[in-house]
Image (cartoon, rainbow, N blue to C red):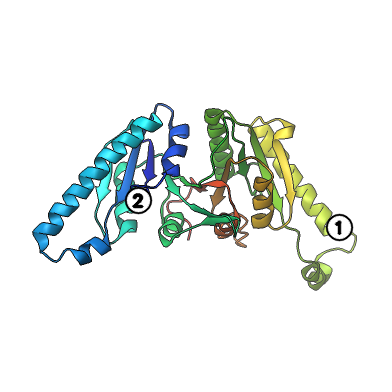
């Protein structure tokens, strides 16, 4: 099975924004859903025995099956058979489903906290980032416009003149989804300049005549230009951001209408330069936008 897999909120009254976003992205492709409907409070209240609990589980599952069918009809999606589970281990159940169905993307609802101006992530979502190798879309409550912006955040390898596999994947996904959504694609890089104290400590390793910040920016401008040429992008589709990646990307997305941020998570090289490695989690932690996380297509497993 392919297509999108949506993880539903286990609340019959929930608005299910993940399904709403999946409907925009799926087009005519099938959409599968996963939901864990286990209720520990109900289990504690049902003291009549195993049979009573089994009957309750069957009724709840059937109610959910009908509810999912109604949601699909309302959203206009092509629904595949839903997977409705009653389990104390949502993560393992979901990972088993992902491994069995091999979806092209998993869509999860990440709750937005207005006071903190960021998405909130549960342990399940953090585990998915670290373990699931398929693309993961973390969808917030905000509604997309008819033409939502799509931003592809790249971290080109300073030691490679041509874009690596992860960079190409990020741009490709950004292009595909911006086309599907009818929005504009922008490719961005956030450059965090080295601390001046560290530059001073480096001493003679850095010639006095070299402006570290300027030379670093020139290098990444060359790398972004290589991306633009190889991916056939227009110059106005490239954006350079200054500052710590997590905050710079979050601020940039906040300046746009609600849209989609596409980013990667991987250890980039031998010195573990992690702009979009572990920092991916910090970007997710600070962002109020929907975030699509990709793993390196050349890696056999997820990043840790």
- Report the label total: 2
Which is more toward the observer, 209 or 302? 302
Q: Are marks 1 and 2 in contact (CB under 8 Å)?
A: no
Residue at position x 66%, y 29% from top? 232
Residue 173 pos. (x, y %): 53, 37
The crowding category of the residue bearing disc 1, from other C-alpha atoms within 10 Å (few below 14, some 14 to 19, many at least 20), is: few
Residue 292 pos. (x, y %): 52, 45
Can see residue 158? Answer: no
CA gap, disc 1 and disc 2: 56 Å
Query: Closer to the camera: disc 1 or disc 2?
Result: 2
34 relative to 25 in the view: left or right: left
Q: Secondary structure at mark 1?
A: loop
Can see residue 22? Answer: yes
Q: Which mark is first along the chain, 2 or 1?
A: 2
Residue at position x 79%, y 48% from top? 218
Residue 207 pos. (x, y %): 86, 63
The residue beneath circle 2 is 11
Residue at position x 38%, y 43% from top? 6
Q: Quadrant of residue 178?
A: top right
Residue 14 pos. (x, y %): 39, 47
Residue lying farthest bottom? Answer: 201
**Which numbered circle lies on residue 211?**
1
Which is more toward the observer, 234 or 6? 6
């Amino acid at each position: 099975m392919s297509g999108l897999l949506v993880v539903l909120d286990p609340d019959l009254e929930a608005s299910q924004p993940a399904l709403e976003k999946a409907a925009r992205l799926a087009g005519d492709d099938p959409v599968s859903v996963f939901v864990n409907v286990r209720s520990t409070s109900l289990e504690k209240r049902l003291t009549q025995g195993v049979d009573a609990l089994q009957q309750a589980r069957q009724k709840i599952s059937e109610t959910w099956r009908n509810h999912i069918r109604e949601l699909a009809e309302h959203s206009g999606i092509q629904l595949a058979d839903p997977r409705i589970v009653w389990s104390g281990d949502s993560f393992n159940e979901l990972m088993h489903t992902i491994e069995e169905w091999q979806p092209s993307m998993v869509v999860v609802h990440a709750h937005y906290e207005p006071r903190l101006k960021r998405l909130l992530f549960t342990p399940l979502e953090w585990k998915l980032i670290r373990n699931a190798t398929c693309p993961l879309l973390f969808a917030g409550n905000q509604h997309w416009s008819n033409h939502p912006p799509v931003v592809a955040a790249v971290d080109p390898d300073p030691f490679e003149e041509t874009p690596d596999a992860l960079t190409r994947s990020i741009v490709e996904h950004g292009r595909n989804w911006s086309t599907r959504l009818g929005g504009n694609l922008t490719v961005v890089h956030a450059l965090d300049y080295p601390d001046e104290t560290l530059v001073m400590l480096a001493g003679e390793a850095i010639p006095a005549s070299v402006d570290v910040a300027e030379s670093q920016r020139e290098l990444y401008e060359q790398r972004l230009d290589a991306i633009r040429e190889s991916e056939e992008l227009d110059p106005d589709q490239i954006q350079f951001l200054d500052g710590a990646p997590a905050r710079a990307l979050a601020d940039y997305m906040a300046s746009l209408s609600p849209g989609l941020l596409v980013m990667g998570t991987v250890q980039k090289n031998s010195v573990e330069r992690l702009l979009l490695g572990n920092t991916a989690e910090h970007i997710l932690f600070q962002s109020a936008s929907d975030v699509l996380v990709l793993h390196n297509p050349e890696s056999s497993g997820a990043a840790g």
